[in-house]
Image: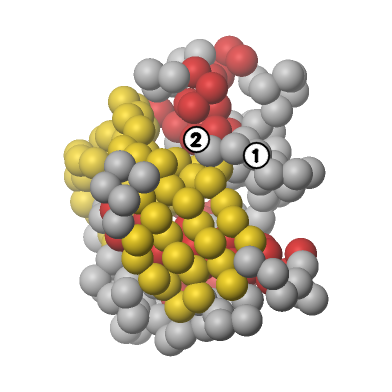
Amino acid sequence: MINKLLDRITDFSGEAYGVVLTEPEGPYRLDFVDKQGTTNRSAIDQWLFQSKDFGISIAFPVLGFRWQATRYSDSLLFGAWYGAAEMETAIAESVHHWVKFVNDAFPDNKAEITSKRTLYRVKVDSILVDLRDKHVEFPQLLDPKFYGFTQQIGEYLYRREMTGILVKSTDILNGTSIVIFKPEALSDVVEVCKLTYRHNPRDKKVMVKRHDTGNTIEIYASAPKYLI
């Protein structure tokens, strides 16, 4: 099974997008490393990011501290950076995970919640395992709740020193997600724009405003996948 799933690689050299918190919120600073300490400075200094503080927020998932369990990592052995080949995919997936966090942390909340984010662009240059069409035969790759199958795939690739994965987005019909296990595959981060998310639990939608253009898009948090 594993050989059939992992039978294609792609030499990927191009841009990817990600979203991080602009301002850490309360005690839940999930996207930022504490700037006062507990960071692996020598590892971070190897990164080629234009802004060191901004670079820390992007680098920490794959460095040796503060890992969190995610779709392709159980957090025990390694971390992973998640981005997307398209700007829209990066925003949609960020919204999905933010709303899940808000609903889990504040299940009784009825008031609007806002979050300030930064959309960034980063260079990805590496050989990646290409899973973009494998969901047809292996639908577990897109399971919205159970990550056991994908975490096994992530560990298998990490132990064999593979850099990362290209895989179909779970939120955008034609979107591509990018998962990176090794920080050296990423460089040259550039801020694209500031974003503000506004979530109203009563009508299950998220308004995303781009501060550079002033445009606002509407994402329904409870809608079926692939509507945006």
Q: Is residue 1 visible?
A: no
Q: Is 46 located above or below residue 126 in the figure?
A: above
What residue is shown at x 35% (from left), y 65% (from top)?
A: 217
Local crowd size for mark 1, using a 10 Å CA cut-off: few (<14), some (14–19), many (≥20): some
Question: Whole-percent x and y of residue 47?
Answer: 44, 20
Quarter of the picture containing the N terminus is bottom left
Report the label total.
2
Say whether disc 1 or disc 2 marks the residue closer to the N-terminus: 1
Question: Marks 1 and 2, how far apart in space?
Answer: 14 Å
Q: Secondary structure at mark 2?
A: helix
Question: Whole-percent x and y of residue 8?
Answer: 25, 60
Quarter of the picture containing the C terminus is bottom left
What residue is shown at x 35% (from left), y 33% (from top)?
A: 191
Residue ID for mark 1: 24
Asked which quadrant contains residue 123, the reply is top left
Amino acid type, callout 1: Pro
Residue 70, label in figure: none
Q: Is 140 located above or below residue 10 in the figure?
A: below
Residue ID for mark 2: 58
Amino acid type, callout 2: Ile
Local crowd size for mark 2, using a 10 Å CA cut-off: few (<14), some (14–19), many (≥20): many
Q: Is 19 located above or below residue 4 in the figure?
A: above
> In the figure, is residue 151 to the left or right of 95?
right
Question: Whole-percent x and y of residue 133?
Answer: 26, 73
